[in-house]
Image: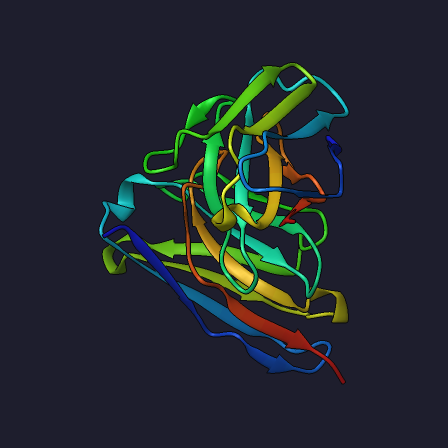
Amino acid sequence: DIQMTQSPSSLSASVGDRVTITCRASQGITIWLAWYQQKPEKAPKSLIYAASSLQSGVPSRFSGSGSGTDFTLTISSLQPEDSATYYCQQYDSYPWTFGQGTKVEIK
Amino acid sequence: EVQVVESGGGSVQPGESLRLSCAASGFTFSRDSMNWVRQAPGKGLEWVSFISSSSRTIYYADSVKGRFTISRDNAKNSLYLQMNSLRDEDTAKYYCARGQGWFDTWGQGTPVTVSS
């Protein structure tokens, strides 16, 4: 199985800050990576697919990059509503696997 | 509005069975692949099972293989998960999610508790 490792596990940042979350795959997955946002007691929400494609309706302050084994999710200007846990997920091969999550808090 | 709504969760004892359902609306269900993804309390996300639009292709996570069965009824716009021989570690919220690879639409989930 492909292991997905996110860093950091949690972070605290101020409104307006640029935030970067890293996801590393245990083997190459080309661009087959997605990012999700999950708020407490809510379902996950799709943000990014194919490493860098923005899901329709998602604010443009969210962006994704990377290929192979190393990927990043960037929030260009953190907003209060971005407080959530973020997960990466590979879909290069079965079983599809998720990272352990990164909790983003607002200072 | 594209929407999926899960139902059928509940509390059962180890070894018992449960059948989850997912009702889809707002899109052409028969054209889309579907999945079940679960999340144990306070934990991360775990993909459970995939079914293609025609039901021709089905995959399971090793943790549920041989115990869970995914199916769909395109005439009823519905997805199912038959869960047998339930274990304590199957306790989770189960989400229905649309997609082949990545999941663009998620339901609110239905909780399953397995405990003696």
Q: How many marks?
A: 0
Q: Residue at x 50, y 33 (%)?
A: B101
* Residue B36 on image: x %, y %: 52, 53
For the C terminus of chain B, which image quadrant?
Answer: bottom right
Location of residue A32 in the rendering, given as x and y in whole percent from the top left corner: 55, 23
Q: Residue at x 66, y 38 (%)?
A: A97
Which of B78 and B65 lies nearest the eye of the viewer? Answer: B78
Q: Is residue B26 above or below residue A68?
A: below
Is B70 left, or right, of A6 in this rendering? Answer: left
- In this view, the residue farthest toward the bottom is B116
Residue located 73% across and 30% down the image:
A2
Q: Quadrant of residue B14?
A: bottom right
Residue nearest the viewer, comparing A50 with A101:
A101
Q: Judge from the rendering whether residue B33 lies leftward or rightward of residue B2; answer left or right.
A: right
Q: Is residue B25 left or right of residue A53?
A: left
Q: Nearer the viewer, residue A15 or B45?
A: A15
Question: What colouring style does the render use?
Answer: rainbow
In screen coordinates, is A1 left or right of A93?
Answer: right
Closest to the observer, B54 or A52: A52
- Figure check: A2 above or below A31: below
- Residue A68 drawn at (x, y percent): 66, 14
